[in-house]
Amino acid sequence: MTTKEYFIGLKKDSESKEWRWISSGSKVYAVKGQGKSYWARNEPNGDGECAVMYNYNGKIGRFNDLSCTIKRKGYICESSVDRSDQEGMLHKLFFSI
């Protein structure tokens, strides 16, 4: 994988301004001291409404807010798998560049 940042399906809600996962609607805290934070240092800094995950320089797995229209980033997408013979909801990740 050649890109160093991946869009991850985390977006700022336009009304509440809270960060939420697109798949479940669950909240991701963006303010230090309000629950566990996966944001990189000084992020989110308000320059975007979508989140990417870093893949470099000691920031692996940390989030950054960017514009949703930025090109040349990778994507990590979540999709339900066939539930036949499966208990509960299973997911698999598709990586695309």
Image (spheres, grey):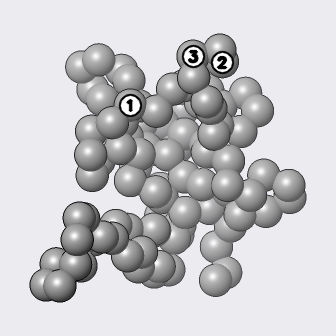
Q: At which x and y percent is residue 87?
A: 22, 71
Looking at the rendered structure, the secondary structure element under dot 1 is strand
Q: CA distance from mark 2 to mark 1?
A: 14 Å
Relative to 26, does residue 90 appear above or below in the rendering? below
**Residue 36 image position (x, y, % from top left):** 61, 30
Give the residue number, with chain letter if any, for mark 2. Answer: 32
Furthest residue toward right: 57
Q: Quadrant of residue 6?
A: bottom right
Q: Amino acid at mark 1?
A: Lys
Name the residue located 71 percent from the left edge and 39 percent from the top edge: 40
Mark 3 surroundings within 10 Å by alpha-carbon count, few (fewer than 14), some (14 through 19), many (20 or more): few
Decide: few, some or many residues near mark 1? Use Cα within 10 Å; few <14, some 14-19, many ≥20.
some
Q: Which mark is residue 27?
A: 1
Q: Secondary structure at mark 3?
A: loop
Q: Amino acid at mark 3?
A: Gln
Position of residue 65 measured from the top left corner of the image (x, y, whole percent):
54, 39
**Any part of residue 56 in sight:** yes
Instruction: Give residue 83's quadrant in the image.
Output: bottom left
Which circle marks residue 34 in the picture?
3
Q: Are marks 3 and 2 in contact (CB under 8 Å)?
A: yes
Quadrant in which the N terminus is drawn: bottom right
> In percent of the image, x 57 and y 16: which residue is there?
34
Calculate the distance from the C-alpha at mark 3 to the C-alpha at mark 2: 6 Å
**For residue 26, above or below residue 81:** above
Query: Which residue occupies 13% across, 84% down?
Result: 84
Q: Is residue 55 above or below residue 64?
A: below
Q: Nearer the viewer, residue 36 or 94?
A: 36
Q: Which is nearer the N-term, disc 2 or disc 1?
A: 1
